[in-house]
Image (spheres, rainbow, N blue to C red):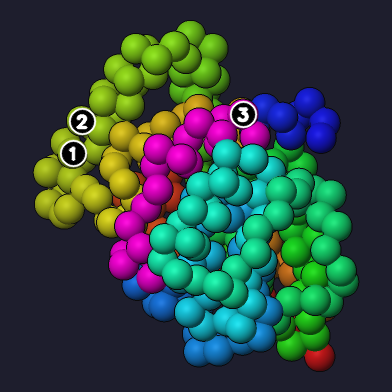
Amino acid sequence: MSQLDVKTAEFYDQFWPKSVPVLDKTREYVAMTVSEAHVGRALDAGCGHGICSVALSERADQVVGVDVSSECIQTARKQAEHFGRKNISFERQDLQNLSLPDTSFDLVWCWGVAMMAPDPMKVIHNLMRVTKPGGVIYLGLYLKTWLTPFHELTRHFCRTFMNGPRRKKFVCDFFTALTHVHGTLVGRQTNLRTDNISIQAQVEDWYYPPYKTFYSIEEIVELFRRNGFEANCIQDRVGRIKSATIFVVKAVRNA
C-alpha cells in the first residue's frame, strides 16, 4: 500500500472495531435501499465492520467484502461468524487498486466509502469495471453544499489541533450536543441513522478521517452515464443534517 492508503487504514483500524452498527437496523436500511430480492454475487466495497456484508448475504448467493483496514477485515469476519453467515468471504484490498476480475459481480454496494480514498475516481471506475452487464451499483457519497468548505476547515482544525484522545472526546461530545440542540430547534429526532452505534461515532467519522471528497448528484449521475450505466439518485438526504449528508445513486450497467 502507498503511504496515502496507510493513513486511511490506520484510522479505520481503530474506528470500526469499536463502532459496529446494529444488524437489525442495517438490514432494514439495506432492504429499503436495495430493490433486488436475490442476486448471485455481491461485493461489499469497503466492508468496514462487516454488518452490511451480513445484510447483503441474506439476498445474495455469495458476498465478497473488501477493505483496506486489516482490523476491519478481522471485525467483519467475526460478525459473519457471529451471525452464522457462511456465504461471505473477506479480502484486504485497496479499492483504488482493486484486483477482482472484470464483470464479476451482479451487485456492488459501496456506501460512504469511495469518497474517503485519496483518489475516489479510481475507486468508482473499479466498481464500474467489476459490475456485470445488467448488474447494479449502489454508491453513497458525501453531498457537496455551500457549507462544504466550512466543514472541511473544521475537519482540518480538528485533525491538526484536537486529535489526542481527550481532545477528540471533547470534539465528539460538543458536536453531539449541537446535534441534539439542532434536533430540538427543528422539532425532529436527532438520530435519523439508527444503525449507527452513537452520534459520537458519526462525529468522529465525519471530522477525523484523513481524506474526504464531496460531490454533486449531477456529476456522479453523468459519470455513470458516460460509462455505460443508467443512473438515478434514489436517496438525496441520508444524514441527520442537510449540510452534512450522503446521497445514494443506483446505477445499472447496460447489457
Q: CA distance from mark 2 to mark 3?
A: 27 Å
Task: Judge left or right: residue 228 versus residue 89.
Answer: right
Report crowding for label 1: few under 14, some 14 to 19, many 20 or more residues within 10 A (C-alpha). Answer: some
Residue 250 appearing in the image: no
Residue 202 horizontal/vertical position (percent): 38, 40
Q: Disc 3 marks which residue? A: 10
Q: Range of the magenta residues? A: 9-27
Asked whether the beta carbons under mark 2 and mark 3 sit within 8 Å of each other, the answer is no
The three-letter code of the residue at mark 2 reads: Ala
Tag shown at residue 180: 1
Q: Against 90, is 71 above or below?
A: above
Q: CA distance from mark 1 to mark 3?
A: 30 Å
Q: Which quadrant: the C terminus?
A: bottom right
Look at discs 2 and 3 and give the one toward the viewer. Answer: 3
Within 10 Å of the Cα at label 3, are there few (<14), some (14-19), or many (20+) other Cα atoms? some
Q: Is residue 160 above or below residue 43?
A: above
Q: Main secondary structure of the magenta part?
A: helix
Q: Are marks 2 and 1 in contact (CB under 8 Å)?
A: yes
Residue at numbered disc 2: 177
Residue for point 44% across, 11% down: 164
Q: Is residue 88 visible?
A: yes
Q: Nearer the viewer, mark 1 or mark 3?
A: 3
How many tags in the picture? Answer: 3
The part of the image, by quadrant, that contains residue 131 is bottom right
Q: CA distance from mark 2 to mark 1?
A: 5 Å
Picture coordinates of residue 188, whole percent (x, y):
16, 54
Q: Quadrant of residue 204?
A: top left
Determine the secondary structure under disc 3. helix
- Quadrant of the frame with the N terminus: top right
> Which is more N-terminal, label 3 or label 1?
3
